[in-house]
Image (cartoon, rainbow, N blue to C red):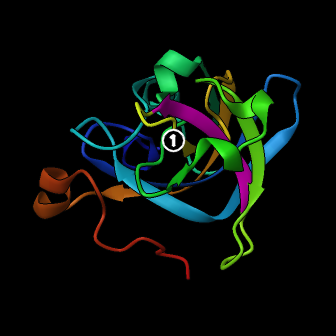
Amino acid sequence: MSDSQRVAKKKAVWFTHEIIDESGEVVERNDIPVAYVHGVPNQMFPQLEREMKGKTIGEEAEATLSPDEHGFQFLDTEFEKVFSENEVPPEYRRVGAEAEFQDEQSGETGTMMVQRIEKDGSIVFMKKHPFAGLTITYRVMITNIRDASAAEIRSGHPEMDHPSL
């Protein structure tokens, strides 16, 4: 395989991925390729980017990330719900308590965590990211590699997300 077809600095790289939890269960799979520009400032996890270096189309790479390394926090500032103390069962009236929810409008389900309790007794819940607090493994499959343009190198992201679609 020539160097032009290997993951290296200033290459636009496309990959599919799955995320595996601590028990080995696949908790997310994306079969639509996503992309980044390798070796320049970008949104990739550095640990995964290191594992992808030198790989070719069709090869896999994986990196295991601790909660501190992946940084998925339980807070979703877009999803904050405030309840009066009497609306919340006693077992959820403490910071850190978790409750399952289903949004009435979207039907979305997930976990909310008590972020804080206000001076007036109101209880503030925020949506918890499903990977918060977990050690996760990213497993990727390289699907395409090409030289990145100058604009792509500056942005850290290819202009065309899905070259094979």
Q: Is residue 131 magenta?
A: no
Residue drawn at 48 percent across, 73 percent down:
162
Q: Position of residue 127 (x, y in %)?
A: 58, 47
Q: Is residue 36 left or right of residue 121?
A: left
**Vertical side of 35 occupied by 41: above or below:** above
Magenta part mainly helix, strand or loop? strand
Q: Which residue is mark 1?
A: 122
Viewer-closest of 164 and 47: 47
Q: Position of residue 34 (x, y in %)?
A: 50, 60
Quadrant housing residue 12: bottom left
Judge the density around disc 1: few (<14), some (14-19), many (≥20) Cα neighbours within 10 Å: some
Amino acid at dot 1: Ser
Residue drawn at 72 percent across, 32 percent down:
92
Residue 59 seen from this side: no
Q: Position of residue 78 (x, y in %)?
A: 42, 57
Residue drawn at 48 percent across, 30 percent down:
116
Q: Is residue 128 left or right of residue 22?
A: left
Viewer-closest of 28 and 102: 102
| Label 1: element kind | loop
Residue 157 seen from this side: yes
Give the magenta-colored segment's residue range. Answer: 109-117
**Vertical side of 67 occupied by 57: above or below:** below
Q: Is residue 21 left or right of residue 66?
A: right
Q: Position of residue 152 (x, y in %)?
A: 20, 60
Residue drawn at 43 percent across, 32 percent down:
45
